[in-house]
Image (cartoon, rainbow, N blue to C red):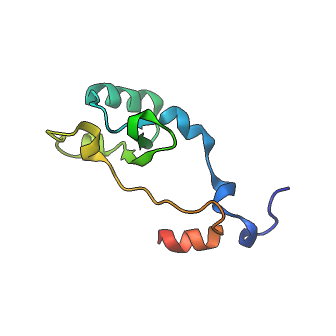
Amino acid sequence: MPPSAISEITAQDLLTLGVIDRIVPATTPADLDAVEARVRREGYSRYPLSENNDPDRIVGYLYAKDLWAGPRPSKGGLAGLRRDILFVPPSMPVVDLLVKMQ
């Protein structure tokens, strides 16, 4: 049954399961040109970065504009473009999550 008020919504209710198809391995050498082509083809703005392509080991995310906004990292491939991700417990009320994200 869907929540009836914003105070009843949790982070779990907002979870997007479709991101598993967008995971990009962060710890293996990646061809940045291939990743850039994928980003242009799929059109998403953020891609989860995982350790060893494991969806249970998300280490950050790739913001698509970082591929074009500045010089490419000379070492580390995608790890050099990694942004930190906010981890929250699934039970966190969405009101508290919004305050944390400010």
Rendered location of residue 58, percent (x, y): 45, 46
**Which residue is at a point 47% across and 30% down the rendered structure image?**
42
Return the residue nearer the eye: 72 or 69: 72
**Depth order, front residue of 56/14:** 56
Residue at (82, 66) in percent of width and height: 4
List x then y, in percent, for residue 84: 37, 56
Q: Which residue is drawn at 39% across and 35% down?
A: 52
Q: In this view, does 102 lie above or below 73?
A: below
State the image coordinates of residue 70 (x, y, percent, origin top left): 20, 46
Which residue extends farthest left? 74
Residue occupying image coordinates x 62% and y 42%: 17
Left or right of 64, for residue 5: right
The spot of residue 9 in percent (x, y) is 71, 64
Number of numbered discs overlaid on the protein picture: 0
* Residue sitting nearer the eye, 36 or 19: 19
Q: Quadrant of residue 36?
A: top left
Q: In which quarter of the image is the N terminus?
A: bottom right
Q: Is residue 65 above or below residue 11?
A: above
Outermost residue toward the right in this view: 1
